Image (cartoon, rainbow, N blue to C red):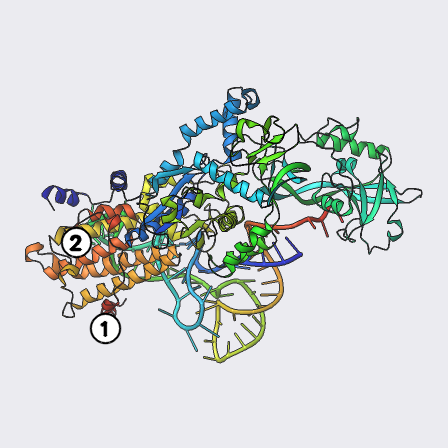
Amino acid sequence: MDAERRAKLEATTRYDPGGVEGRVYAAWRAGGWFTPEPEGTAAENYSIAIPPPNVTGSLHMGHGLNNTIQDTLVRKHRMMGERVKWIIGTDHAGIATQSVVEKELRAEGIDRHELGREAFVERVWEWRERYGGRIVEQLQRLGASGDFAGERFTLDDGYVAAVHRVFVALYEKGLVYRDNYMVNWDPGSHSAISDLEVENREVEDTLYSIDYPVEASDRVLTVVTVRPETMLADTAVAVNPGDERYADLVGGHCILPLVGRRLPIIADEHVDVEFGTGALKITPGHDPNDFEIGRGHGLDEISVIGEDGRLTDEAGPDYSGLTAAAAQERVVADLRAAGALRAEEPYVHSVPFSHRSGERIEPLISLQWFCRMDELAKPAIDVVRDGRIRFTPERWERVYLDWMEAIRPWCVSRQLWWGHQLPVWYCDRCGTTIVAEREPEGAECESCGGALRRDEDVLDTWFSSALWPYAALGWPEDTPELRAFYPTDVLSTARDIIYLWVARMIMTSLELLDEIPFSDVYIHSVIQAPDGRRMSKSLGTGIDPLELIDSHGADALRFGLLAMSSSQDVRFSEAKVQQGRDLANKLWNASRLILLNAGDAEPAAATGAVASSTPVEDRWILSRLERTVELVDERLDRFDFSHAALELYRFVYSDLCDWYLEIVKPRLYDGPDQGDASAAANLLHVLERTLAMAHPLMPFVTEEIWGYMPDRRSELIGAPYPIAEPARFDDEAEAEVTAAIGL
RNA sequence: GGGCGCGUAGCUCAGUGGGAGAGCGUCCGCCUCACACGCGGAAGGUCGCUGGUUCGAAACCAGCCGCGCCCACCA
């Protein structure tokens, strides 16, 4: 060590992350460590595909934890000598991004419809150009060693090709189809959404009882409903086939009040005898259950509520044009006037809302594109059942399988502008539908020569996400990256997207590439606010990871997040981040002690100086070190990050600093020349292995200290990961020292 | 309605058949020549409740109470 560096080390009594991280990170990038050559096979290489954050996003604590986990794994495997690629990219995030830009436009007093589709999409690309890189920069502050040079976006040209290939392939197999079907209509985003984007909330409504007179009789059938306005679209009344109260009425008709339509009285198992009066009004056009029942009985499907949330002409002149809420008031008033309203009572029940816009879902029948999932699910169930894909913690396997076994069709079309426009063209002249990867030549219909019109809809964002790990590597092209890094090894994510994303990646990969996309799925903790509520910006419960990096350092945050993570949800604890900061500082100062006093001794491993003749405390610390190396390695392999982190902490604080350094100080202190060379050598050896062991978790401080090591050969990021040497486990020395110091 | 998870020291959490632990906080003493982001020491728990299995239970089983999450077409 030259005098200048020595003086700097001597003077720096406190580790300063702010002065280190930027410089160290730049050196890693310049060293090319993040971007591997696409060589070798996926079996010998190691890869992880990042869950691509939304371009609109900014780093939150969940990203912090998940990306720390991935970086820890990636760094460990890189040090183990594997060719490692952490696939990085962002997601175009259909509705979220479109909303952000729409809001921006609105602030300028512009409606997107004035702008037109093309100009609007152009505007979104501009937005993405300006702000889309933010979250990626934030990842880098964490120390993420991903392949940023190969960054992908789920709307890149190549990615579009992948999406089209999959859509067409599934269409040709009959799995993707267009149908008039009941969908979850989100009046907020003015689009259909999938079942998974719906969340049920408890709502207090009014339950209305309405009398439907039975035809040619003085009896009435009383039905109950929370949405009386939908009665305008009723096409039947159903009772349970075993319900004796109504047995004689089945096959007859009743008269729909206000409208006068004859409604068949049908029998259907779905009707609960216990609920209400046991008679159920059937509205196939506006209720998912009634839709099923209606299809089963071949009932008419009438729609009285349109996509704009207002009553249509079908509803009749009295109601047409009203909002659903206004129509409800009007219908109730009219029923009351007609004497048909028997009762109204408060009623709490769960109601579907759009996860995205927060608006109440309007179930209605709409012409949309769907993907049949049952056939895709079968092999995806098998690979999890037979262990080719493992979930950690294991219990999520059951959750995955239960959902897959009851999977339903997926509505994939969205009435938005930002996203993958469907590769579908229609000929209005002859009615042909063309589904193709590229626009047909001349945009003309092959059979009649008519002009083709492209479907305006875009795909659900999750449709493109489902291809992420392989499309990001260049599929459907046969790229070197794909050959070298696919299938990937681990997928690390939160449990809330097991269905939305994980399951669909497995299904599409098996279908299109006949391979599993990854062999391990690690489901990490959800980090809650310190008070146990959700961490969320709108609740004001969010804590900004970047502020913690500013105040305590990236290593501190990484350590803290890993240490607090668990197999279940955890409350955020800044104390754990401080513990990480303290550990970084401890490592720094222990290293100062060693490096400033060990002179230029060779680490013991290099000189072979560690033998049974060495002092018992030396054998003791070596034994403790090797056991810790083994433990940390094993815990990381089992995705048990908190124990890995805490074991590292324990070793550094307790074994190394509290005991060994204190014991060995006298041997060290007479200066490097007069001091005990074996102690110096031993210390350097222990330090070297400790830094390497700690690096995947705390890359910055360990790399910085590594730069001061006397025999420094290369950067720590590329140094060998320590493999435990059981030959140095020394029960005797441990027993002796334990007895002596009362550990 | 079904399922999953949780309830251990003031706080946040480990521990899952045989010693009740960590970090933070609290109290006492220390700026001791690596580190006050530090060092030494101390106090603090009927391990949600009840019953069972066992020589032995915080841990296994059953029931109950409380909290959280997911799924579900009772209008």
Residue A385 position, x and y percent, is 52, 60
Residue A511 position, x and y percent, is 51, 49
Task: Say above or below: A513 vs A114.
Answer: below
**Res. A62 image quadrant:** top left
Q: Is residue A88 left or right of residue A651?
A: right
The residue that mark 1 highlights is: A732
Q: Is residue A260 left or right of residue A423?
A: right
Q: Which of disc 1 and disc 2 is earlier in sequence?
A: 2
Q: Residue at x 81, y 44 (%)?
A: A237
Compare residues A116 and A687 and report the one nearer the observer: A116
The residue that mark 2 highlights is: A594
**Crowd band around label 1 with a 10 angstrom C-alpha radius: few (<14), some (14–19), many (20+):** few
Q: What is the quadrant of the C terminus of chain A in the image?
A: bottom left
**Amino acid found under the numbered disc labelled 1:** Glu
Cα distance in 3D space between marks 2 and 1: 26 Å
- Res A502 label: none
Q: The disc numbered 1 marks a residue on which chain?
A: A
**Res. A15 image quadrant:** top left
Q: Residue at x 73, y 27 (%)?
A: A322
Compare residues A326 and A637 and report the one nearer the observer: A637
Q: Secondary structure at mark 2?
A: helix
Label 2 and label 1 in one chain: yes
Q: Secondary structure at mark 1?
A: helix
Residue A455 position, x and y percent, is 59, 31
Count of numbered circles on the image? 2
Q: Disc 2 vs disc 1: Cβ atoms closer than 8 Å?
A: no
